[in-house]
Amino acid sequence: MKLADVATPHRGGEALVRVQLAGVCNTDLEIVRGYAGFQGTLGHEFVGVVEDSPDRAQIGQRVVGEINVGCGACDWCWAGDARHCLQRTALGIHGRDGAFAEYLNLPPENLLRVPDEISNRQAVFTEPLAAACEILTQVKLTPEMRVAVIGDGKLGQLIARVLATTGCNLLLIGKHSDKLELAAASGIKTKVLSELELDPARRFEVVVEASGSASGLNLALELVRARGTIVLKSTFHGAVELNSTRIVVDEITLLGSRCGRFATALALLASGKIDLEPLIAAEYKLTDGVAAMTAARQPGTLKILLTA
């Protein structure tokens, strides 16, 4: 990693956004370790102001942006879902410089205006919050269902808060008492991993793996009941050992879950049902970006923000 002076980006037909605030996530840290083979400017969580756009009505608007940009011609793009376009680029992840910069480019259709009642420090969570909300489009949760979330880090905290809005019987499992206390303050039941008792008769219908660790999947297999569902959220550099026998014998569904829709996340933020301010650990200037990434790597650290 290094700090560099680069030219203001200008992609033809795209909007120019001045970044106000950007967030560091575990994917950024894994990219530095080699995940996705990306080279360029990192960062995909941001809120900013449109400086220029082919859609002149966007100029001056405070926005967040869907990070996947498709080819515009394949079946996925025609269906309005560039998240699975084979030719897509992804902001700060694949083929496109990201948000750890003063300016970035995205197509006008990728940008969503941030409602006035949402602060920058809440809006910067839109991308990971949308990823958390995506689970609810993939799995139907009801109040009587037992649901576990593995991981008390940045993403696990968001997922727990989103799933709690369904009224399901939710448990957040983690290693850090201080972070679990943050979730408990929001009314979420928690358990320290070292104190977790595995009861075969009390397994969970749904287990969300968001630990960011290869060991999290094996724990999920221990926790999920027969014919239950494991939702995989972690992305990391390296391979995972998997006990496929248990998956086959107990007919377990493994469900990958990635990006979600930003409009859903913005609506949730605007509703006031969740408060993400307690998840912010520190804010750094963009010029101190290398130090910010170093801080984000420290065990137990929650959200680190970069400001221009």
Image: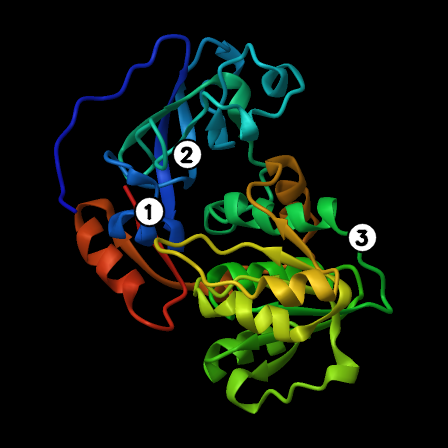
User: At which x and y percent is residue 268?
Assistant: 67, 48
> Pointer 1: residues within 10 angstroms few (<14), some, or many (20+)?
some
Q: Is residue 269 above or below residue 110?
A: below
Residue drawn at x 23%, y 21% as measured from the top left: 8
Q: Give the SS element for disc 2.
A: strand
- Report, in whole angstroms, how far the alpha carbon at label 1 lies from the one at label 2: 26 Å
User: At which x and y percent is residue 187?
Assistant: 68, 75
- Report, in whole angstroms, how far the alpha carbon at label 3 lies from the one at label 1: 31 Å
Residue located beneath label 3 in the image: 140
**To which quarter of the image does residue 209 belong?**
bottom right
Q: Give the SS element for disc 3.
A: loop
Question: Going by the image, does 39 lie left or right of 233?
Answer: left
**To which quarter of the image does residue 299 belong?**
bottom left
User: Label 2 is placed on what type of residue?
Assistant: Gly
- Report, in whole angstroms, how far the alpha carbon at label 2 lies from the one at label 3: 33 Å
Residue drawn at x 39%, y 50% as measured from the top left: 27
Q: Earlier in the sequence, mark 1 or mark 2?
A: 1
User: At which x and y percent is residue 286?
Assistant: 23, 45
Residue drawn at x 55%, y 29% as measured from the top left: 84
Residue located beneath label 2 in the image: 48
Residue 25 visible somewhere in the drawing = no
